[in-house]
Image (cartoon, rainbow, N blue to C red):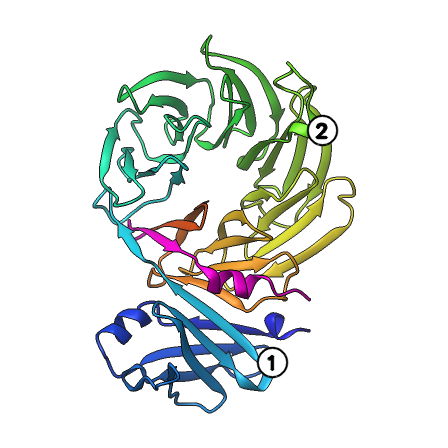
Amino acid sequence: MSAAGRCSFEIQHDWLQATVHKEEKFWVNLKIKDMPTLYAYVYCHALQEDRSFPTSDECLQACLVEPDVLKVTYVPENFSCICYSSQKQFHPSKQLYSNVLDVTDGGLGLSTDRDGMLYVWETTDGMVRRKFEGHCLELTCARFFPSGLVILSGGLDMSCKIWSVELGECVRSFVGHRGSITGVGFVGVGKQVLSGSKDGTCRLWDVGQNVCIREICKDDSPVTTMEAVYYSHLGRENDPMNGNIFAVGHSSGKFDCYDLQSTTKIAEMRLPYSVGVCEFLDDRKVLVSCEDQVRLYDLSKTDTLLWQCGFTAEVNSLKKWGAGFFAALSNGQVHYVGEHVGSLPDIQLLGPDHEPVYSVRVVDNFVFTSARDGIIRKYEFGNSFENFTIQTV
């Protein structure tokens, strides 16, 4: 087993503040398989000329890679943890809760609060531009349309709504599910939209006619996650449905993929526990979470698991980026995992103090996260991140 599979770092979430304010120390924990947990301190008040810090245990080395990037190495196994702190923090709702997040490449972000309010804000400074109120209960999911100027949301009130950012109002409502909405998605540019629900069904809606076209799947167990993706090389000209793959996970552990044009099932997987979230890496490979595990499947041979990796807490969100993906956890950690599991250092985004991170989104070299503390955190990556992630097995 590699060091990455045996070792797990946990580092004080506000280590950067401790360093900037010249506090005496911050703590580092290292869990090693079949060994006692290593508890140590990094003495941040004693930064050396080579940008290293003294530590309380000779098995650990610590240094600054950049002013806001920390590297801690477990010397006996030469395994490192690279920790990034957020460059900016936004708090659109002013509440201690933010379970939904999406961002566009046009500079807008969205998040929610416990009262069913949806906030649209600028990704540069967090300034709130719109507030949408219409769901009578908490929102569970929301996404920008591909245009970036329209939003599709779903909530505990069993309805889906479409909001115009330009007009500042709700322009469509879809009602018909008999359970809370657990996921939403788009077909093409958004002339048709998808919804998943705890009633066990996924529905395809026509936006123009404001009607349900069909139920794509119907199951006794609630839908826990759904994802619709389009790959142009799979489609045909003037056929908006062809080339769309639709994936849906259930609390029973069922995870199925469909061709949206024919609504035929093209792949099925069975997990031991409730399906958490999913993320497509390409038209054949899909990541699926199950409690604290993430599995990679090939849709052409689902009987064979390509690989799986375990984390220290339940996985709440997955997002592809580069040759790997980010995984947001319920213990406040966000990890970046390379295409070859175990080939990279333990790259973490730090921020919440053991508060669950509910969602992670990526635009260019910026990563945004939302957490239970209500804060949206923005991370920026430069050359140092690229240097870490070009390592391979």
Q: Which residues are magenta?
A: 372-393
- In which quadrant of the rendered view does residue 210 lie? top left
The residue that appears at 66% across and 26% down in the rendered structure is 243
Lateral position of residue 167 relative to residue 256, left or right: left
Q: Nearer the viewer, residue 122 or 155?
A: 122
Where residue 138 appears, as percent x and y from the top left, is 33, 35
Lateral position of residue 182 relative to residue 109, left or right: right
Q: Which mark is residue 265?
A: 2
Helix, strand or loop at label 2? It is: strand
Q: Amino acid at mark 1?
A: Asp
Where residue 326 appears, as percent x and y from the top left, is 51, 53
Q: Quick one: quadrant of the C terminus?
A: bottom right
Is the residue marked by circle 2 packed among few (<14), some (14-19), or many (20+) residues within 10 Å?
A: some
Q: Which mark is residue 335?
A: none
Q: Quick one: quadrant of the N terminus?
A: bottom right
Whether residue 67 is situated above or below residue 74 in the rendered picture:
above
Disc 1 marks which residue? 34
